[in-house]
Image (cartoon, helix red, strand yellow):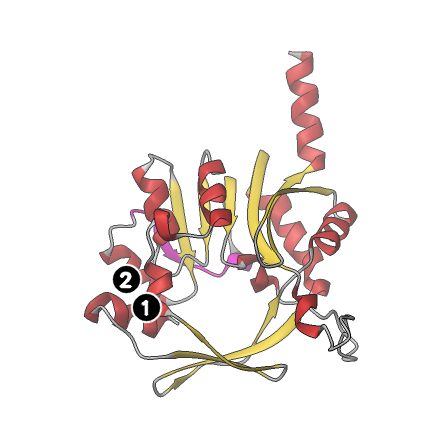
Amino acid sequence: MGRAIADYYLKGKAARLRVFSPLFEEDEIPVSTLFREFKDMPALERKALDLAKGKTLDVGAGSGCHSLVLQERGVDVTAIDISPLSVEVMKKRDVKNVLVQDFFTLHGQYDTILMLMNGIGIVGTLKRMTEFFHLLDKILAPGGQLLCDSSDISYVFIDEKGFVDLPDTGKYYGEISYRMLYKDTIGDPFSWLYIDADTLKAKAEENGYAVEIIDIGSHYDYLARITNLKTSKKLNTKLHNS
């Protein structure tokens, strides 16, 4: 993806960014959508950006389109991505604070964490959700919020009779294995998680977090706000006592 982003930035166009999965037919990511402006973003993304406040982290920032919007609004935003090429492009696009950084080795604290474009998918599996919430214990500031969008992909498995026929793989149906191909660059296989809202709520509660569904999209997608119940209670108690 980083190579595709770099090509599009330099040439104004890119070759096909192809996506493969054992469960689905070959797909393609239109690289131009990674450079869209606020007016061209889906409603759920626009809503998330409107809700961002305080010191903000843009996870998997890609070309930096979300960070640039927030910068223009005066938000203190840091963009991270694991791709050095993506980070180089963001710097050239004048994203002020940008790092080559794996989310799961991150330090520091943030008032808002953005995981857009199904960004929570980097968690990979339901089993890893515990590790995800343990990290939030460290990096989400008291009273802070994580804003993410995801999808319930059970619709993919609806049979001709209208019933959901989930694959018998022994794992959660939203755990998908992908691989990307751009020109002659073949990426390593990676796991991606599409998590339905009810499962996200259950996993959050198991780890002391609350999930609020902010909005629902037009195609089985939703925007959620995740907050830490433990720090929220402490903050409310402190405010009440003062």
Callouts 2 and 1 close, C-beta under 8 Å: yes
Left or right, 92 with reference to 131 = left
Magenta part of the chain: 96-104
Q: Is residue 58 above or below residue 127?
A: above
Tell me the distance, in whole angstroms, between the alpha carbons under discs 2 and 1: 8 Å
Q: Identify residue for label 1.
A: 5
**Quadrant that contains the N terminus:** bottom left
Left or right, 128 with reference to 163 = left
Numbered mark located on residue 86 in the image: none
Q: Is residue 98 above or below residue 73?
A: below
Kind of element beneath mark 2: helix
Q: Is residue 221 above or below residue 32?
A: above
Residue at 79% from the left image edge and 77% from the top image edge: 170
Left or right, 80 with reference to 3 = right
> Which circle, 2 or 1, is nearer the viewer?
1
- Quadrant in which residue 233 is drawn: top right
Q: Of label 2 and label 1, which has the lower sequence position?
A: 1
Alpha-carbon neighbours of circle 2 within 10 Å: few (<14), some, or many (≥20)? many
Q: Identify residue for label 2.
A: 89
Kind of element beneath mark 1: helix
Q: Position of residue 98 (x, y in %)?
A: 35, 53
Among all residues in the image, which is located at the extreme bottom? 184
Question: Does any portion of residue 155 appear in the rendered image?
Answer: yes
Residue at 37% from the left image edge and 41% from the top image edge: 70
Alpha-carbon neighbours of circle 1 within 10 Å: few (<14), some, or many (≥20)? many
Residue at 33% from the left image edge and 36% from the top image edge: 73
